[in-house]
Every structure is written in structure tokens, then in C-alpha cells.
């Protein structure tokens, strides 16, 4: 099978398209024929070697945590999927393994793809939308009627955070550049702040949650704009930020957190249900064939994408 293979850490140029052996599904696993795979910042951070303590240094390495495709094989102990099922998932196997024509997935992370999404739209969703869902829910504890500020509202995580916050009944203030104001408003934001003309934290009032999806806000300044029980949540760890493990970390009012979470089929099914109810959708910035994986990473590294970047593995994706 064809795969984008990483043989060493480094810039985008270290990735090569190679023919490698097709894997097989183990106990509790599925082998999925990949039609599309999502590209996320974590991918190039692993590629750069910044996350070797977590993901190791075993080469050759195949990146890619987001996948949409068709079940090709079921492993022992898997009873709720069959060959031919259309599925999507956020992989929790190694460094993902989805930049390939076939990927092995733990069945506990997989759900059936909603008919409302094509493979590219489905592959864009899992990691980013689950990041948003888990953060808004815990440690955000966002409730109906509360106020949330989402910084980076037009980015890969932000597009889903806006929609999910609205699904939870919150009042949403989205922060983006002037060119993305209309998009963020279409996604459901009650207020859109153009950061090129107005500092988002230099406003009246306070928020129950400040969700910094790009890590550009000052944690200290953000705390000053939180309500009594509010928290600041960022996707970029920095000084003053505590790693939050659900069920382990004690949430403190006006705390600053970086959430550590694990993918589950139950959470992905929540997203799929919202998709079926027309309350959640993907926004695609760009689509690249597998052979242009380097260009896809370079686009992601600009950190200026409008929505998600996706790899098309099969022509019918």
C-alpha cells in the first residue's frame, strides 16, 4: 500500500511516499481502507520531533490521526462492525497511522460516518471537534446561558468550538480576522470580534469561559476577564498553564488549563448526532492528494487555515 512515511524527524521534506506492507487488524481492531485523512498541527509537531517523549522515535512512522473510510477487515472480538461499513474516527494507535491507503484502528474509537458528510468532511472533524467538545465540557463546564469567548474561531478547532458551544446553549463571542467575520457569524456566533481592529480582551463584561484555540492571548489578562467561576483554556501550553486530566485534576475558578483527553466512540457519536440534526458541519480550507503531503503540512504550519486541511487518499473521497 502507499503511505506517507517519516524516516526521521525534520522539516516537511523528510516525508516520502513509499510502498509498504498492508497491516492487519488485531484483537478489538478494524482495518480501514482510507478515503480521506485530516491534517492537524499535532502531525507536524510530531514530525519536527517536538513530541518524541509521547509518541516515540520508532521509524518508519506514519502520521495522521483523522480518518474516514470503509471497513476492510475486522479483528477478533469486534461484533458491531462489518466489512463495507463507512466509518470515521480519531485514531489512538501510535502516531495515528492514517496517512496511508489502509489504517488499523481500535474499534472503541470508531463510529459510522453520517451520510450527511462526504469522506473529506468526515476526516476533517474528529480530532478538532473532539478537542472542542472535551474542552468546552471539561474543564470548561459550559452551560446553557453562559458566555464563552473563542479565540481563533475560524481555525481548525475554532470552527467546531463555535458550533458546539451554540449546541450547548451558550452565548458565543468569536474572535477572527476581518476576512472570516462572515464565516464565524454563519457558524452561529452571537458576536464576532475582528482582532485586527479591536483587542478581544479590552471589552466590557466578562466570560464564563475563554477558549484560546490559537494561544495568542495573555493568560494573566484573560483571567481578569473571567467571571467568578470561569476558566481560561488554551491549546498551546505556556507558563501559568496547568495540564488538566479529566477526573484527576481539581478545577479551580479562574484557573488556566491545557486539556489532556482520549478519543471515545461515545463522544464521536455525539458529534455524528449533531451532524445528522444539521447542527454541526465541517469547513474545508484545502484538499491535497497524498502525494502532496509536504505541501499540506506547509499549509498547516502557516497557522492561517480557514477551517481544516484534508488529504484525499482515494479519488472518490
Image (tube, rainbow, N blue to C red):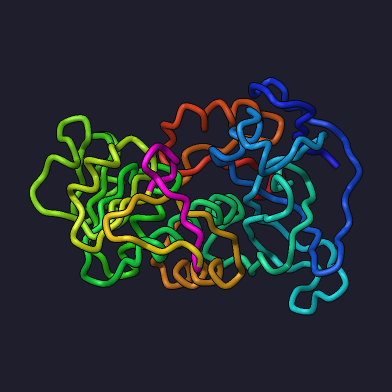
Where is residue 228? Give x, y as percent.
Answer: 19, 61
For the point 89% across and 39% down, the residue is 20
Q: Is residue 191 above or below residue 303?
A: below
Where is residue 283? Give x, y as percent.
Answer: 44, 48
From the viewer's perspective, is 108 left or right of 131? right
Q: Nearer the viewer, residue 82 or 14?
A: 14
Tell me which corner region of the image, top left, top right, bottom left or bottom right, holds residue 30: bottom right
From the viewer's perspective, is 40 left or right of 79? left
What secondary structure do most residues of the magenta stretch adopt?
A: loop
From the viewer's perspective, is 301 left or right of 49? left
Q: Nearer the viewer, residue 5 or 139?
A: 139
Q: Is residue 190 above or below residue 55?
A: below
For the point 80% across and 65% down, the residue is 29
Image quadrant occupied by the N terminus: top right
Where is residue 143? Give x, y as percent.
Answer: 29, 71
For the point 73% across and 67% down, the residue is 107
Where is residue 131? Give x, y as percent.
Answer: 48, 55
Tell me which corner region of the image, top left, top right, bottom left or bottom right, holds residue 60: top right
Is 237 magenta? The answer is yes
Q: Nearer the viewer, residue 233 or 157?
A: 233
Q: Which residues are magenta?
A: 234-247
For the point 77% across and 67% down, the residue is 84
Q: Is residue 252 above or below residue 300?
A: below
Is 73 magenta? The answer is no
Amino acid at each position: 500500500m502507499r503511505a506517507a512515511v517519516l524516516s526521521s524527524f525534520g522539516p516537511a521534506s523528510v516525508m516520502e511516499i513509499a510502498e509498504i506492507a498492508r497491516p492487519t487488524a488485531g484483537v478489538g481492531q478494524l482495518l480501514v481502507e482510507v478515503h480521506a485523512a485530516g491534517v492537524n498541527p499535532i502531525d507536524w509537531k510530531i514530525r519536527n520531533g517536538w513530541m518524541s517523549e509521547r509518541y516515540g522515535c520508532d521509524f518508519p512512522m506514519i502520521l495522521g490521526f483523522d480518518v474516514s473510510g470503509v471497513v476492510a477487515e475486522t479483528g477478533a472480538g469486534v461484533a458491531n462492525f462489518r466489512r463495507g461499513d463507512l466509518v470515521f474516527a480519531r485514531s489512538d494507535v501510535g502516531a495515528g497511522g492514517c496517512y496511508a491507503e489502509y489504517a488499523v484502528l481500535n474499534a472503541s474509537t470508531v463510529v459510522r460516518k453520517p451520510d450527511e458528510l462526504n469522506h473529506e468532511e468526515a476526516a476533517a472533524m474528529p480530532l478538532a471537534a473532539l478537542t472542542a467538545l472535551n474542552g468546552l465540557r471539561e474543564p470548561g463546564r459550559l452551560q446553557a446561558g453562559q458566555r464563552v469567548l473563542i479565540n481563533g474561531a475560524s481555525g481548525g478547532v475554532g470552527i467546531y468550538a463555535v458550533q458546539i458551544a451554540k449546541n450547548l446553549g451558550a452565548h458565543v463571542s468569536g474572535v477572527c480576522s476581518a476576512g472570516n467575520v462572515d464565516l464565524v457569524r454563519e457558524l452561529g456566533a452571537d458576536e464576532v470580534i475582528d482582532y485586527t481592529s479591536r483587542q478581544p480582551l479590552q471589552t466590557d463584561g466578562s466570560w464564563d469561559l475563554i477558549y484560546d484555540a490559537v494561544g495568542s492571548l495573555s493568560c494573566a489578562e484573560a483571567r481578569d476577564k473571567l467571571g467568578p467561576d470561569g476558566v481560561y483554556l488554551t491549546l498551546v501550553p505556556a507558563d501559568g498553564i496547568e495540564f488538566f486530566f479529566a477526573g484527576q485534576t481539581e478545577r479551580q475558578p479562574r484557573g488556566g488549563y491545557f486539556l489532556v483527553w482520549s478519543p471515545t466512540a461515545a463522544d464521536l457519536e455525539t458529534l455524528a448526532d449533531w451532524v445528522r440534526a444539521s447542527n454541526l458541519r465541517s469547513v474545508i480550507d484545502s484538499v491535497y492528494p497524498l502525494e502532496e503531503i509536504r505541501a499540506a503540512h506547509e499549509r498547516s504550519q502557516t497557522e492561517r487555515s480557514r477551517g481544516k486541511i484534508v488529504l484525499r487518499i482515494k479519488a472518490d473521497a
